[in-house]
Amino acid sequence: MRIAVLGASGRTGGEVLIAGRGRGHRMVPVVRRPGSGGEGERIADGRDADALRVALADIDAAVFTIGPTPATPDPAVMRDSAAATLTALPSGARLAVVTASGPFVAGDDPPTRFLAKPILRRVFREAWADIAATDRLVAASDAAWTIARPPMLQDGPARGRYRERRDGNVRWGFALRRADLAVALLDALDDPTTVHAVVSYAN
């Protein structure tokens, strides 16, 4: 498959590129800054639907990993970029969108649901609102989407395994290696049962 990675210059996007190339896919990094995506990069701002339409014109699938960073916080970057991506996505292309499990409580253990998350919701109010809005936007679209909800993402080598759940968050799943998430996303693109599914992942 020819797979575009939006946000390819980030840590999660970079792991998707590595994992996809390891499987023999043709990976297409889509980045804002020339020179930040590496081999085969295409330049498009995540909010620019016209530029994205050109960058995604010949792809079979896309993995969306755009989100705010500590250096560049933006309370609407995810939902705005997801909206532009949905507009630009070629007809019939698969789409895997990485959001997060944080704003959602279905499946959580009681301490997380009733103690930790009410506190975290106040701390991450804007970021979690952006995530929830992105989920709603993607789920309402006609695209062949999969929403991936990981917990806290960690760097480091893949553990070689991941857990998934489709009716809520992975219980007692507090973290996930980015390298394992990359594998899970590629697995989801190959699995027709994940079309129009929300899948939570954790190590």
Image: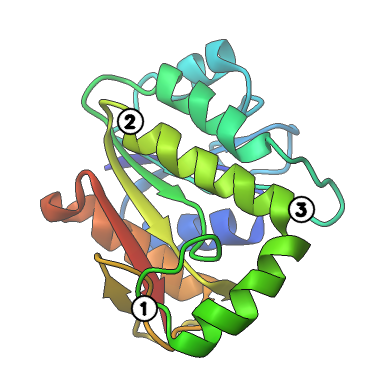
Tell me if I can see residue 8 in this picture. Answer: no
Q: Is residue 150 above or below residue 91?
A: below
Give the residue type at disc 2.
Answer: Ala
Answer left or right for 175 relative to 43: left
Q: Residue furthest left?
A: 193
Answer left or right for 153 relative to 144: right
Q: Which mark is residue 140?
A: 2
Q: Residue furthest front?
A: 114
Mark 2: secondary structure = loop
Rendering coords of residue 103 (x, y %): 54, 60
Rendering coords of residue 136 (x, y %): 42, 38
* Residue annotated with mark 1: 170
Q: Residue at x 27, y 72 (%)?
A: 165
Rendering coords of residue 123 (x, y %): 77, 64
Q: CA distance from mark 2 to mark 1?
A: 24 Å
Q: CA distance from mark 2 to mark 3?
A: 26 Å
**In this rendering, which labeled residue sits more in front, label 2 or label 3?**
2
Q: Earlier in the sequence, mark 2 or mark 1?
A: 2
Give the residue type at disc 3.
Answer: Thr
Q: Earlier in the sequence, mark 2 or mark 3?
A: 3
